[in-house]
Image (cartoon, helix red, strand yellow):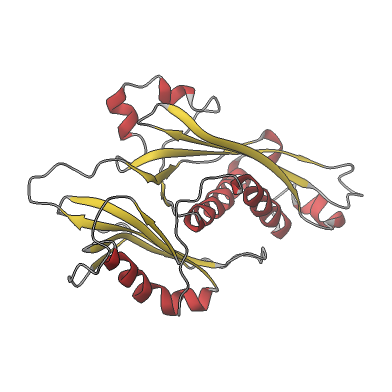
Amino acid sequence: MHVTRTAAGPTTPSGHALKVYELGDKVDRPYEIVGVVSATGNRAGVRSKARKKMLAEAATLGAEALVGYYYDDETTVSTGDDDGWVGALAVKFLPSGAAAPAPCKAVVALPHTVIGEDLGTGKKAQKADAIARKHARLLLAKKGYYAVFVDEQISPTFPDGLKSLSATDRMKYGSPEADQVLAVTLGKRHALNILLIAGASQVVGTALYSKSANAITWQNSAGAVAGDLGVSWGLGHLFVPSAKTVQSVHAALVKAFETLPDLSQPTTVK
């Protein structure tokens, strides 16, 4: 379990039976985000234990509901990391007519990945984008953030395009609840020889931009090797990202995220 407190509040249960709004459900009441709760780990364990534990943790934050609850149930190749995770915003309802939720530094807008030329275009680039965003979302959850996928394209000159917007338009970018925007760039993959290669590295660049501060608050880049890839990788990656592509992207993101500030207070599920 990963719990992030984002607003001052009681440290005892709110006394309310918390309602759960699934990701995509409409919430017709204004609310304040008081925290982020998530769970990562074994897929079966997360599926069976996370929801009840998350509700209990949210209650201790003074929350009255979980908003944007999602469970990632897509099966992927093994990366040696957690393969199941779930996340949600812990919220407290405000009086009718109150202002919309203010931007929260623990909520991150996650636009599409900037794809390097050597990773191709079309369906191949779309798959690489999906891989990068999926694993970035997992790693953000492990550090106490809540990631929101957004369809807005991001400029390769990030964050210049955001800085040029008016303050109002900038705060609306992605999700009005998100103060942070994460840029992920998949760079070139290095190899000695595409047919004789014994290993390859995926270069990943990351940068976190605060819309309210209008500045980059964190950035890092890293490369990672995905083992003995052999001829099959050298030929296969020309057409579609392989299991080794997933592993190398994940490993590079893990390295890059090592320096990302951790907002959470991890707790143990019993």
Residue 72 coordinates in the image, percent (x, y): 47, 64
Q: Position of residue 261 (x, y in %)?
A: 51, 46
As drawn, 215 above or below 112: above
Q: As drawn, which residue projects farthest toward the front?
A: 11
Left or right position of 21 against 215: left
Residue 167's place in the image compared with 177, above or below, is above
Q: Name the quarter where the N terminus is drawn.
A: bottom left
Rendered residue at 92%/49% (across/down) = 196
Residue at (20, 57) in percent of width and height:
92
Q: State whether residue 212 is above or below residue 87.
A: above
For the point 13% across and 52% down, the residue is 94
Residue at the top extreme of this rendering: 164
Of 114 and 220, which appears nearest the observer?
220
Q: Quadrant of the C terminus?
A: bottom left
198 or 159, which lies in front? 159
Is 104 situated left or right of 123 in this image?
Answer: left
Quarter occupied by residue 172: top left
- Where residue 234 appears, x then y in whole percent? 82, 50
Q: Nearer the viewer, residue 151 or 23?
A: 23
Relative horizontal placement of residue 138, taking residue 88 as reference (left or right): right
Query: Taking the image as drawn, is residue 27 in sight?
Result: no
The image quarter containing residue 90 is: bottom left
